[in-house]
Amino acid sequence: MHKKLNEINNNNQFNKIMYEKMNLLIEMLENQNKEIKTLAKNIENISEKLEKIVDSSLQMKSNSVSPSQCIFPDIENTIENWKSNVSINNKILETLFGGAQLKTSFQEIIIILNKKEKLPFHLKSKIIYVKTSTTNNWDDFEKDHYNSFVICLWQKILQYYLNNSFSRETIEQEDKDHQLILSIRKTFCDVEKNKKQLIKFIKDTILLG
């Protein structure tokens, strides 16, 4: 009887030791699991930070590259030369006074002039660049040269109209023609919607057409 009690006692002691070891092992595994999760989270945070640093670096590098450092076609003509060479004739006035809306007729005039002498434009990353003689580089057309381009055409059309006889049936029609020419500058320089439409036309028709 005494022997049997000793055996039971020993078994209980053994079970207790095994239980304690098992709890210790479970605790160790749980701690390791927490450490692994923490390490994984740290790695994820570090990866995110590295991605942000790389993106920021690439953005800075992209912003630091001027248009002149990009690859552009090698052409001699510049926007200054092109504007100097622009010549207006009766065909241009007939197009302007042909009955179409001013936005349509002005676009047709640009097509005619571009056929006579190709505009020194280049489309890159959806931006129109123009070759200039002042810096001998490519500048952002919309940002730096759009208004002067429109004003140049407007002034040359007006000058030709005033210096040449373009007969109309009535004085009233001549006044309308005069007012139409005078409205070119305001229509395409002061109205943002028209400006965007004309730039889109140049991209889609002159450069991609």
Image (cartoon, grey):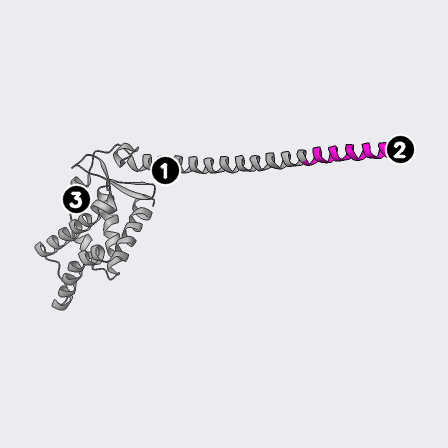
Of residue 22 and residue 172, the one placed in the foreground of this image is 22
- 202 to 168, vertically: above or below: above
- Mark 3 residue element: helix
Task: Categorize mark 1 by other alpha carbons within 10 Å: few (<14), some (14-19), many (20+).
Answer: few
The answer to whether residue 104 shows anywhere in this view is no
From the top left corner, tell me how far across and down residue 110 is, in percent.
24, 49
From the top left corner, tell me how far across and down residue 155 is, in percent.
13, 52
Q: Amino acid at mark 1?
A: Ser
Q: Amino acid at mark 2?
A: His
Q: Residue furthest right?
A: 1
Q: Which is more N-terminal, label 3 or label 2?
A: 2
Of the two numbered discs 1 and 2 in the rendering, the one whose residue sits closer to the viewer: 2
- Mark 1 residue element: helix
Q: Which is more N-terminal, label 2 or label 1?
A: 2
From the top left corner, tell me how far across and down residue 187 is, in percent.
21, 58
Residue located 28% across and 53% down the image? 196
Residue tagged by mark 2? 2
Residue tagged by mark 3? 83
In this picture, which residue range is highlighted in magenta? 1-23
Q: Amino acid at mark 3?
A: Lys
Residue tagged by mark 1? 56
Answer with the quarter of the image where residue 52 lies.
top left
Screen quadrant of the N terminus:
top right
- CA–CA distance in space, label 2 to label 3: 119 Å
CB atoms of marks 1 and 3 within 8 Å: no
Residue located 19% across and 58% down the image? 186
Residue 157's disc number: none
